[in-house]
Amino acid sequence: MVEEPRSGVRKPSRPNSLRAVEWRNWSRTESVHPIRVETPDSPEAVQRAVQAAAHQGLTIKAIGAGHSFTGIAVAEGVQLLPDRLQGVVAVDEASARVTLAAGTRLWQLPRLLTPYGLALQNMGDIDRQSIAGATSTGTHGTGGSFGGLATQITAVTLVTGTGELLRVSETENAELLPAARLGLGALGIVVDVTIQCVPAFALHAVERPEPLPEVLDDYLERSAREDHFEFYWFPHTQVALTKTNTRLPGDAPRHPLGLLDRVVGDELLSNDLYRGLCALATITPAMIPGVNRLATRLTGDREFTDASPKVFVTNRSVRFRETEYALPRAAVPEALRELDRLIERRGWRISFPVEVRSAAADDNWLSTAYGRETGYIAVHRYYRETRPDQLEYFAAAEKIMVEAGGRPHWGKLHTRDAGFFAQAYPRFDDFLAARDRLDPGRVFRNPYLDRVLG
């Protein structure tokens, strides 16, 4: 039985267009001045916007929170903001499936899903993104038995390049579902997604520093055994800050972080103090190894239990830039060891930690975990570290990851092109065929899609 939504789709009363101004993404790696900005408040309004753009010979792109580091959301023609398409569209409580409007932000989901006793099966550690943007770019969390957000999708409604409102599900246009779940914005403007949720659950989190060599030796076993395992490694140290989350029933006793832990640990040390240290390190790089050693002593040693979104998600206010590669899981330990050796060999000073996670294999055609058990290595730099010698780090890390069989995250910095992806993804040509079918006039193209799809 499908129940009427309690929250409804938010439709504020205001014009469907805004004055075009310069848009910049969160990391300040991309900017554009679109010809015009549209703010549709319904699927029909999205259809009209697409049809008008096509008629005028303009491209059109939807953007969410701008949290991608690549130019995947850059709109040179019409920029479509989905902020008026938010909230719960429908709920099927019997199947635990919830349809969400495309612009719904991940941070809104606990409030929207709690009345139904539901939660997302897995989440990443940042929740600023829109649900359509996060799934379209392959956002993921960690857990060797769990897929990324797009694997939780059972249906998508999108507006195609010809202005058609198309439903893709297990029973309607089902052949397109492995493409539409993670469509890069190349197949259409997503107006809603249906998510397979699970009963609300708690997580028991154990965060602690451990010797990096031992963590690497045990990475494969722990990624398979633990529900959600990840770790951070600060270069110039031999310490891994591990985080192990164990799933518990929704009514399990809670032992959340106290106010002092949250203010001091999550805000003061992880954000405010760290932001200042990163800024100082750009001026005095020689201090970075000492700062990193201090960071491993001050953070990552605590234990708590809380509702799953409060454990999965961490506030990240320090602005950074990132590249991330998905590797065959067995290749992760040696790739990280090689990265460590390279940093020391080149004499680089790297202030931001490297993050290591995992995901189960899935069958979405352009998923970084397509067809294989996957491990992720993400490298970061403070956003003000933009000198050519500082950016060499990303290029060198990318070379290591590619040689290890890696595939880059679609929303994070990389230099790969369509020739590479044609070899990396067995169903790449099938995705291109779906694009030809749904956007024959390339209404949704932009420079990034031209590079990665051809």
Image (cartoon, rainbow, N blue to C red):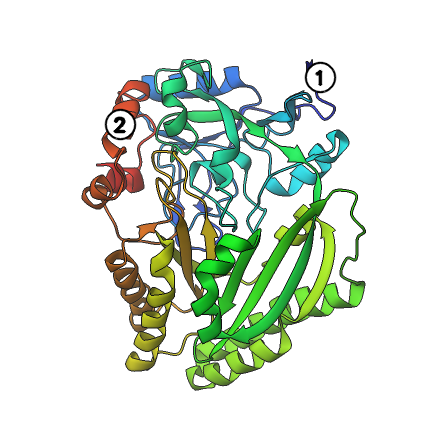
As rendered, which of 95 and 407 lies closer to the eye? 95
Total marks placed: 2
Disc marking residue 446: none
Residue drawn at x 21%, y 39% is 422
Residue 218: x %, y % from top left: 47, 66
Circle 1 residue: 4
Kind of residue at badge 2: Asp
Dot 1 crowding, Cα within 10 Å, few <14, some 14–19, many 20+: few
Dot 2 crowding, Cα within 10 Å, few <14, some 14–19, many 20+: some
Can see residue 160?
no
Q: Is residue 173 left or right of residue 262?
A: left
Res 172 quadrant in image: top left
Tag 1 secondary structure: loop
Q: CA distance from mark 1 to mark 2?
A: 37 Å
As rendered, which of 146 and 180 lies closer to the eye? 146
Res 391 quadrant in image: bottom left
Residue 72: x %, y % from top left: 37, 41
Closer to viewer: mark 1 or mark 2: 2
Q: Are marks 1 and 2 in contact (CB under 8 Å)?
A: no
Res 445 quadrant in image: top left
Residue drawn at x 25%, y 36% is 426
Name the quadrant of the N terminus: top right
Among numbered discs 1 and 2, the one appearing first in the sequence:
1
Name the quadrant of the C terminus: top left
Kind of residue at badge 1: Glu
Tag 2 secondary structure: helix
Circle 2 residue: 430
